[in-house]
Amino acid sequence: MDWLSLMKGVTGLADNLLALFTKTEARRLAKREALASFAEEIARSLATVSASLRNGEVPHGECARIETLAGRLPEALAGAVAPEEAEKWRDLLVRSHNVEGMVAELNRTTDIAPYLAEIDQAAGRFSALAMLLRLPL
């Protein structure tokens, strides 16, 4: 799977979570703040990756951060989605964590704009999810 398709999958994950947590029953979960913090941290990592790539830098450390956060996703979503779905979403994030691999692919392309746009979209959606989870019911 190429990195652009993978990042589109991460954006899709954010869309799925946004759709899930706009439903009243999911919004009433006691773990809303924990889920908001999780989404905020994913957004922050993706934004860091995007900014580093724009500056021609390799975002060292973000691989491990995204992988660690991905590993916590099933626990964060417990009670909100089926365990199989949470594990599928975790696996998607784990596959996206190899930022250095993305840099290698970007070095082979002349147009990195679509990659950066997709990373920015995913970051924005995770940030929006965090904000929505913090809204009063």
Image (tube, grey):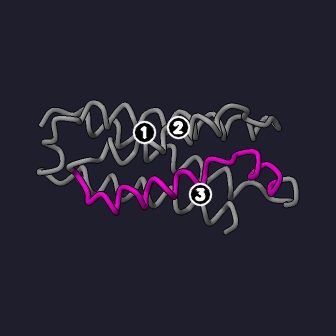
Q: Nearer the viewer, mark 1 or mark 3?
A: 3
Mark 3 residue type: Met
Dot in front, 2 or 3: 2
Q: Is residue 45 left or right of residue 49?
A: left
The answer to whether residue 29 is above or below residue 12 is above
**Residue at the disc numbered 1:** 127
Where residue 29 sits: x, y (%)?
A: 16, 41
Label located before the other in sequence (1 or 3): 3
Residue 102: say if magenta. yes
Inter-mark Cα distance, 1 to 2: 18 Å
Task: Quadrant for residue 87, please give it.
Answer: bottom left
Mark 2, Cα crowd under 10 Å, few <14 / some 14-19 / many 20+, is: some
- Magenta part of the protein: which range? 80-106
- Label 1 vs label 3: CA separation? 16 Å
Of circles 1 and 2, which is in front?
2
Q: Which mark is residue 111?
A: none
User: Would residue 34 be found to the left or right of residue 58 on screen?
Assistant: left
Residue type at mark 2 is Thr
Q: Could you say whether the residue bearing mark 2 is in a helix, strand or loop?
A: helix
Amino acid on which disc 1 is placed: Ser
Q: Residue furthest bottom?
A: 1
Q: Residue at x 80, y 35 (%)?
A: 57
* Residue 65 percent location from the top left of the image: 58, 34
Task: Write the residue at 17% across / 44% down.
Answer: 27
CA distance for labels 2 and 3: 18 Å
Residue 101, horizontal then vertical, whole percent: 76, 51
In front of the other: 37 or 126: 37
Q: Name above or below for residue 15 compared with residue 100.
A: below
Q: Which residue is mark 2?
A: 68
